[in-house]
Amino acid sequence: MAGPHFCIQPARAKGAGMTHPAPTTPRRVALAGASGTIGQAVQRELEAQGHLVTVLGRPALADRDALTAAMAGARAEVVISCIASRSGSRKDAQEVDYKTNLVLLDAAKSAGAPHFILLSAICVQKPLLAFQHAKLAFEAALAASGIGYTIIRPTAFFKSLSGQVKRVKAGKPFLIFGDGQLTRCKPISDRDLARFIISAIDNADMQGKILPIGGPGPAISLREQGELLFQIADKPARFTAISPRLFTAAERGLSVGAPLSDWFAEKAEYARIAHYYATESMLVRDPATGLYGADLTPEFGEDTLEDHYRRLLEDG
């Protein structure tokens, strides 16, 4: 089977022409990873649209026989995987992002499910980390499996951009890396991402493709996130800059002990992850130039980061 088709669509204005209609026929859907934030949103949206959902919990995913029985009972027409390692460590990534998804794929094929939708990540475009390589390995296995597939690579989630809301509300400075302009993203809400994932059901235009997706633009830098938060909180903007080199230094120091200790190896990988997110944009990367482009990153949905920040600050 040919490799996956990487589909880059031009960015569109908020709400313009990107919303795919929900299928008119309810489908039997097996959902893995429903305990996570995005998985929960996908389950809610599937049920709201009238699909028949079988949630594959962690015990089933950890037991091949139990998973095979669950898939047979679900008689799934669509399998959706929102499985993702929580730590990003090498061991966790291999076990969850690759092996658990592979077990799920085998069960889907055995049960005769015709379509597998995978939630991946846009950062795998430039794979420098263990979890990125694990995700890519499974993407390749899925594309070569013979089953109909859709691979969705979202940009940053609202949740991942919300860690400093309490700091700003408490009057503390917003932490940035370098000048705060090193990276940009088009964050997407849980609800909008769930709707995009589900829009792949019965959608021939989304089958056999890798689809990057962001929320309504424009792309925003880390410093602009802070400025937006201070503005909504009606506080003067204050920033504290951190050099990404600190993560590099930490990674080098921890790597010395990595061959002798899993603890050191894990912490070294965390330092690599921190440096990556401090220096790499979550946008579509032009393979010809190696540059990230906001105009290359498709947009979907209606929820804005500004509205999300406003709700968080008002709700405490």
Image (cartoon, rainbow, N blue to C red):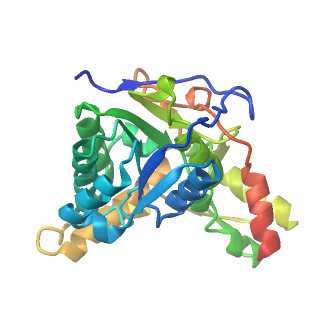
State which quarter of the image contains the C terminus. bottom right
Q: Quadrant of residue 6?
A: top left
Nearer to us in this view, 57 or 143: 57
Q: Classify residue 267 as left or right of residue 47.
A: left
Q: Residue at x 33, y 27 (%)?
A: 4
Q: Residue at x 28, y 40 (%)?
A: 112
Percent across and percent down for residue 298 are 59, 31
Q: Quadrant of residue 127?
A: top left
Percent across and percent down for residue 85 are 35, 62
Q: Classify residue 130 as left or right of residue 33.
A: left
Is residue 101 in view? yes
Q: Residue extending furthest right? A: 234
Is residue 179 in view? no
Quick check: 111 above or below 92?
Answer: above
Q: Quadrant of residue 144?
A: top left
Percent across and percent down for residue 209 are 41, 28
Quick check: 170 above or below 98?
Answer: below
Q: Residue at x 23, y 34 (%)?
A: 145
Quick check: 21 above or below 89?
Answer: above
Nearer to us in this view, 294 or 135: 135
